[in-house]
Image (spheres, grey):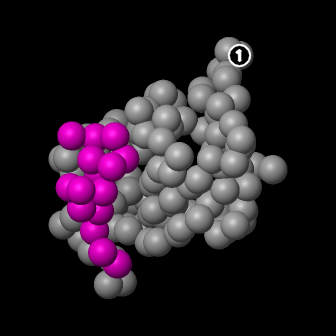
Amino acid sequence: MRILGFQRKWDKLQQPEFTTFRFERRDKDWQLGEQVQIVYRPRHKDREILGIAIIVGKEFRSPDAELPKRNIVSISDEEAREDGFMDYEDMWGWLLEVYGAGDRLMFEPMNKLTLRWVS
């Protein structure tokens, strides 16, 4: 079972179903029906296993609203709020902080994953 890590304890993690945005994995991308272990601070010595969730939805989204890719819908303000941000601009600031302004953020689509807690 693969780990899906979070660096913050987002309020959304208290909901029965929640979303997260992740770039495609280079080894094997996230799959519908896949069970994942949700972990807070996975690379830290004090990491915390929050539980097991199943991926119940997967859609592509463009992280950069100015450069829609291959007819992929951009992340909306509503989706950004559901993900724990004030709006898209707040989310974009977080993405820039985490990924920098490199090619990946500017030109690759992201997965919008919808997860449901199993345990």
Q: Quadrant of residue 65?
A: bottom left
In the picture as drawn, the residue positioned furthest to the top comes out as 46
Q: In this view, does 15 lie to the left or right of 39?
A: left
Residue 49's place in the image compared with 44, above or below, is below
The image shows residue 23 at horizontal and vertical percentages of: 51, 58
Residue 91 seen from this side: yes
Frontmost residue, 33 versus 59? 33
Residue 18's place in the image compared with 50, above or below, is below
Magenta span: predominant SS is loop
Q: Where are the magenta residues, as a range?
A: 72-86
Q: Tell me the kind of residue under disc 1.
A: Lys
Is 52 magenta? The answer is: no
Frontmost residue, 74 versus 53? 53
Tell me what residue is drawn at x 30 percent, y 75 percent.
Answer: 73
Image quadrant containing the C terminus: top right
In the picture as drawn, the residue positioned furthest to the right comes out as 1
Tell me what residue is drawn at x 45 percent, y 62 percent.
Answer: 112
Residue 109's place in the image compared with 102, above or below, is below
The image shows residue 68 at horizontal and vertical percentages of: 27, 74
Q: Quadrant of residue 100?
A: top left
The image shows residue 107 at horizontal and vertical percentages of: 37, 67
Q: Name the residue under label 1.
A: 45
Frontmost residue, 29 versus 51? 51
Q: In this view, does 1 lie to the left or right of 87?
A: right
Tell me what residue is drawn at x 44 percent, y 72 percent.
Answer: 60
